[in-house]
Image (cartoon, rainbow, N blue to C red):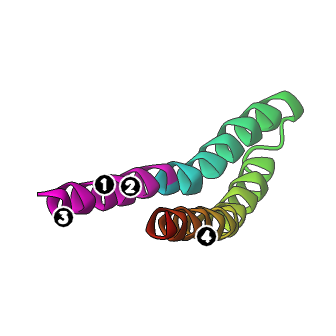
Amino acid sequence: MSNKKYRWGDISWMLAISAQGGLMVAMPVVVGLAVGYMLDIHFGTLPWITLVLTLIGAMSGPVLLHRWTLSAVKRRMEEKEDEETS
């Protein structure tokens, strides 16, 4: 019975990590697109600033995701080790 709860905890943790990771990749792109579009409208340079900021968001999203995932997995492994020792 406790093994089932243990597996459900792991599954829910993985789903939460996946959802947060998806947002972490998508949000820099969306923010770059929105801010770039507003700046392009303001300066009359459509589509150049939008393209640059969207590309920056597309490149930074996976980097942020990688760093965040490594720290989240490290924390999870440390928590599991602490649970096993106590």
Q: Position of residue 5 (x, y in %)?
A: 21, 54
Whether tag 1 and tag 3 are in contact, CB under 8 A, the answer is no
- Report which residue position mark 4 lands on: 74
User: First in sequence: mark 2 or mark 4?
Assistant: 2
- Rounded to the nearest angstrom, the CA distance separating label 1 from label 3 is 10 Å
User: First in sequence: mark 1 or mark 4?
Assistant: 1
**Residue located at (45% from left, 69% from top):** 84
Q: Nearer the viewer, residue 12 or 47?
A: 12
Quick check: 46 above or below 15? Answer: above
10 Å crowding of disc 4: few (<14), some (14-19), many (20+): few
- Rounded to the nearest angstrom, the CA distance separating label 2 from label 1 is 6 Å
Check the image and name the residue furthest to the left. Answer: 1
Label at residue 3: 3
Q: Nearer the viewer, residue 64 or 49?
A: 64
Q: Is residue 43 left or right of residue 12?
A: right
Label at residue 9: 1
Whether tag 2 and tag 1 are in contact, CB under 8 A, the answer is yes
| Nearer mark to the viewer, of 2 and 3 | 3
Label at residue 13: 2
